[in-house]
Amino acid sequence: MKTEITNGIHYVGVNDRHKHIFECLWPLPYGVSYNSYIIADEKIALVDTVEADFFTQYLDNIRSVIGDRPIDYIIVNHMEPDHSGSLTLIKKYYPNAKIVGNKKTFGMMQGFYRVGNDADGDTLEVKNGDTLQLGSHTLAFTLVPMVHWPETMVTLDTTANVLFSGDAFGCFGALNGAYIDAEMNCDIYWDEMLRYYSNIVGKYGTPVQQALKKLAGVKIDYICSTHGPVWHEHIERVVGMYDRLSRYEGADGLVIAYASMYGNTERAAEVIARAASEAGVKNIIMHDVSRTHHSYIIADIFRYRALILGAPTYNNGLYPQMESLLSELAGRDMKNRLLGWFGSFSWAGKAMKTIGEKNETRLHFEPVGTPVEIKQSLDEATTRACEELGRAMGERLL
């Protein structure tokens, strides 16, 4: 079975089709891959590992490439347990392998696994710009902190022009047979990359931009991420996508996210959507925050520039699912977004005011239009106000 990507570099990763929720937070309708790579030269390097549950298959994959040869180096680009979880086990099978990482890597490694003890001559600490010779292959290390953990680094094989990028440029979705993009239909991975970036990396736009600048001008023929396809044919699209998302550049479109207990708030959302459409907005997505997993709502808010939120008052506060969504958005430090909002109540209004307060103190999106407050159900005046809010957003957006 073919494992070689290019020039002695092999894919030895595994697929996880059992896990339903990534990080116990994000749905995995297509599963997820944990990618790992072997560089077979005079010295053998293993780049990142996989989640420990898959170690038996993983070890078989490694042995199918190198046979009985020892591993000389285990390169740890990222310490998250879905990539470092097999470190303890792999060291039992390859006890003489040196673990390669940076100073922060080894601090975490000791905390998670009690391995990587420099006193035992077990480690090779690298700094930004350091290189490692394997034979004909030269590896260069670049530190990219907070993409998306503080110890993160990437490894460039300068001989083969292959970037081992850790979680950067990764996406959800198991690999269905092929592992190189040129040998598969990549359609499902584009939305899964958007969702992966917005859900996992979204807060760290500035560090991603700094990482992209460090790699600018570097010749890269393959990107070997820890999740998703090996990128070869679509490198320009993938890098462009990360660049755009990390700048928080949304396309011209509108997300209307609402909560509705008995249908009255939903009717208001429909009125707003119709008015925005009549104002010329073609890309409109509506989400009921109680029915759609927030993973997908967050992805669409990264996709489009405009957002309108609406919810009923609940227990003299904001409807819980909307409260949760606002907290999730605030945690991503998004920029360059337009926001309108509306709220409803039966006897004591709180929702509209709370959304406005949260925008002022946490989201900091640009307010658009006049917020609408609906008592019990739409009447002629509040219907007009909803129409005006939809039109105002359309005019500001376009």
Image: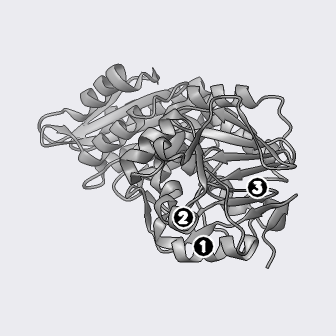
Q: Which quadrant holds the N terminus?
A: bottom right
The crowd level at tag 2 (other Cα within 10 Å; few <14, some 14-19, many 20+) is some
Q: Which mark is residue 43?
A: 3
The residue positioned 24% from the left and 46% from the top of the image is: 320
Query: How far apart in space, not on screen, are marks 2 and 1 (Cα)?
Result: 8 Å
Q: Amino acid at mark 1?
A: Leu
Query: Looking at the picture, which amino acid does disc 3 mark?
Result: Lys
Residue contact at pointers 2 and 1, CB within 8 angstroms: yes
Q: Are marks 1 and 3 in contact (CB under 8 Å)?
A: no
Residue furthest out toward the front? 120
| Residue 377 found in image quarter | top left
The secondary structure type at the circle numbered 3 is loop
Residue 268 position in % (x across, y down): 37, 43
Mark identifier at residue 59: 1
Give the residue at x 25% y 27%.
Answer: 353
Q: Is residue 277 visible?
A: no
Q: CA distance from mark 3 to mark 2?
A: 17 Å
Question: Which label lies toward us, 1 or 3?
Answer: 3
- Mark 2 vs 1, N-terminal side: 1
**Disc 1, SS:** helix
Residue of label 2: 90
The numbered mark at residue 389 is none
Say which of 179 and 43 sits in front.
Answer: 43
Residue at left 72%, top 76%? Answer: 64
Residue 88, given in percent of the width and then of the height, sits at: 46, 61
Q: From this viewpoint, which residue is outermost toward the bottom? A: 1
Task: Find numbered disc 2 in the image and state the secondary structure of the residue it sits on.
Answer: helix
Horizontal arrangement in the rendering, residue 243 relative to residue 102 (left or right): right
